[in-house]
Amino acid sequence: MTKEQQGLENLSIWNDAASMLAKAKKDGVETVWDRLHEQRNECAFCAQGLSCSKCVMGPCRINMKGDKRQHGVCGADADLTVARNFGRFVAAGAASHSDHGRDVLDTFAAVAEGKTKDFQIRDEAKLRRIASELGLASDGQPIDAIARALADKFYQDYSSRSEELSFLSRVPEKRRTRWAELGVTPRGIDREVVEMMHRTHMGVDCDATNICLHAVRTALADGWGGSMIATELSDILFGTPRPTASKVNLGVLRKDMVNVLVHGHSPVVSETILAAAKDQDILAEAAKAGASGINIAGLCCTGNEVLMRQGIPLAGNHLMTELALITGAVELMVVDYQCIMPSLVRIAACYHTRFVSTQDKAKFPGATHVPFTPENARDKAREVLRMAIEAYTKRKPERVEIPGQPVDIMTGFSNEAVLEALGGTPQPLIDAIKVGSVRGVVGIVGCNNPKLTHDYCHTNLAKELIKRDILVVVTGCATVAMGKAGLLTPAGAEQAGQGLASVCKALGIPPVLHVGSCVDNARILHLCAILANALGVDMSDLPVAASAPEWYSEKAAAIGLYAVSCGIYTHLGLPPHITGSKTVTNLALNGLEDVIGASFAVEPDPFKAAELIDKRISTKRTALGLTP
Ligand code: CUV
Ligand code: SF4
C-alpha cells in the first residue's frame, strides 16, 4: 500500500501524530514514513537473511528458487547465511545494551574513586544490598570501598573470564542447569559478543544450529549482564524508582517555556541535564530570555529512564521523535546514543531547534558536539541549557503548534517498589496468580516500526490481555502507547477483567505497570526469577509471556532471544530476517521449545496474538495445577 492510498490517518492511531504529519506536509519536512515509501520493493534476499557481504569474494545472494545458485562463493548455504546474519544481529543488540551499561559503570566507578563531584550514590541501601547479594563484604564497610569492589566485580563481568556472570546467582537452579547442559551459560559479556563476531567470519562456525546456540549465550550475556548492570547501577546512582505521577504525549511541550528534549538511552546525560535545569542562575537566564522556565521532556528510552526515576514527562516514542521537532516548539534536542534517527539533525535545521550530541562514539554531522564525561558532565549540561535558552529567543511563534492535552500516567514500578507495595514478599502476587484473579503476567516491550500502524498493536494487545485478567508490564517505546491509551493509570483498570480490576483497585495500581526502559527488561527477568524461586519451579513453568509487537532494532532481537532463553514464550509482530532458512526458522518457532522451554511466535494481528498468549498462559497454569 502506498502512503497516499493509506492516508496519513492510517500511519498512526494518535491525533498528536496526525496533526504533526499534516504540519510536516505543510512545512515540507520529510519523515520516516516518506522514506519507507521510497524504500518500498525491499530486497527479497535481504528480507529473508539470504544476502551476505561478510567478505570480498562476495557479496553473495543465496537463491532459494529452482536450481540457481544455492551457495555463496565460499560455499555457505542458506542456513549458514541466515544464522551468521542473525548471530551478528543479536550480537549488535547485546553490544548496544551492554556498552550503555559500561558507560553507567564508568560513571559509577568515577564516583567510587572520588574522580567526580557531578554524580553521587543516591541509593546507598541498594548498593549495600547488591554488594552482599554478590558476595562482597558490605556490613561496616565504608560506602566508597563497597562501590569500588562492586565496580571491580562488574568490570570482570565484561571481561574474557570463563566463569559465569555475577547475576546468574539470581537464576533458578533448574534453568542454570539447562543452560550448562546446552553450553550456553553466559561468561564475560564482551567475550560472548566478540566470539560471535569471530564465529561468523568466513570459515569458522559453519553449523547454523551451533551459531544459534551462541546467539542464545550472547543474548543471555545482555539480559543477565550488560542490561542488568545498567539497571542496577543506574538505580544506585540516580535512585530506585518509586510510584510517581507524570504525563505523556506531545502536549507535554510548553508554549511559555524553554523546551529541551532528551533522547537516547543512557541516564547519565539526561539526569545531568535535569540536575542543571534546577540551577538558579540558569533559571534566571531563562527568565531573562522571557521564558517562564525550562521544560525537560523525554523521548524513547532515556525518556523512560528519567520518567521512571524522576517523573519527567514523556513526549513520545520512536516514531514520534521526528514529529516532536515538527511542533516548532523544541529549542534543543540533546542525545546520547541508540535509536536516534539521523534525519533528526536535518529536521532540527528546518526550525530554530539546536541538535546536540554528547558522546564521542555517537557523532551526528550537522550537530553541535558537546562531549560529556563523568568528570565534566555538570558543566557541559549547563552549557547545553544555555544554548537552549539562546534558541528560545529565536523561536518563531507562527510556526509553533503543540497538539492536544497531555495524558496522566503513573510510573516507577521497580521490583523494589512492587514488592514493597505487596508487603515485602511476592506472596500476595503468587496468591493472586493461584486463585486466577491475575492469570498471568506479560511483558510488552520495545519499539515502533513504520511498517506497522504506529502503536496499534501495542495498545490493542495490552487491552486484550488485561481484559483476560493478564497483568501487563511495559518498557521502552511501548510505554508511550500504553500511557496515551489511558492504561497507565489506576482508572485504566476499568478496561480490565474483573479479577485484575479488583487487584488493581485494592492496590491502587494501573493494569499496565511501567517498569522502565529497554535495559530495564532486566527487572522483568529478575521478577520472573523471584517468582520461580518462590514457587520452586523453573522460569519456563510460569504463566508468563513477552511480546515485542512493533519492534525494529537489533537490541529488540537480543531481548526477545534472552526472554525465550529464559523459558519465556515471546511474541513478535514481525519476523527477523531469518525466513530464508528452514532450519533457523523452525528452531525459532518450534525447536527451541524442547531444548529451552519456550519459543517465538510471529503474528502481526494483536487480537490473534492475544489469543496465542492466552492459550500459552492457560497451558502453563494447567501444568501448575491451577484453573486455566
Ligand atoms: Ni530502547 S530500542 S525504539 S524501545 S528506544 Fe525506542 Fe527503547 Fe529504541 Fe526500541
Ligand atoms: Fe559470499 Fe561466503 Fe564471502 Fe559471504 S562469506 S560474501 S557467502 S563468499
Image (cartoon, rainbow, N blue to C red):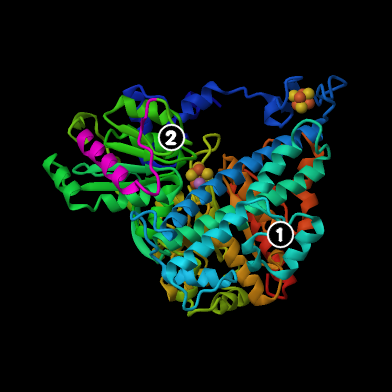
Please tell me the numbered disc located at residue 4.
none
The answer to whether residue 497 of the structure is visible from this angle is yes
Residue visible at 28% across and 33% down in the picture: 328
Q: Three-letter amino acid code at disc 1?
A: Glu
Q: Position of residue 187 (x, y in %)?
A: 69, 55
Which structural element holds mark 1?
loop
Please tell me the numbered disc located at residue 163.
1
The answer to whether residue 485 of the structure is visible from this angle is no
Q: Position of residue 624 (x, y in %)?
A: 72, 73
Identify whether 312 is placed above or below 256: below
**What is the quadrant of the C terminus in the image?**
bottom right
Q: Position of residue 172 (x, y in %)?
A: 69, 69
186 relative to 290 in the view: left or right:
right
Identify whether 598 is placed above or below 213: below
Residue visible at 77% across and 43% down in the picture: 211
Q: Position of residue 212 (x, y in %)?
A: 76, 45
**What is the quadrant of the N terminus in the image?**
top right
Q: Nearer the viewer, residue 48 or 288?
A: 288
Q: Nearer the viewer, residue 34 or 477?
A: 477
Q: CA distance from mark 1 to mark 2?
A: 53 Å
Say whether residue 367 is magenta. yes
**Mark 1 or mark 2, whichever is nearer to me:** 1
- The residue identified by callout 2 is 9
Residue visible at 24% across and 29% down in the picture: 399
Identify whether 385 is placed above or below 514: above
Which stretch is magenta? 366-391
Q: Three-letter amino acid code at disc 2?
A: Glu
Which structural element holds mark 2?
helix
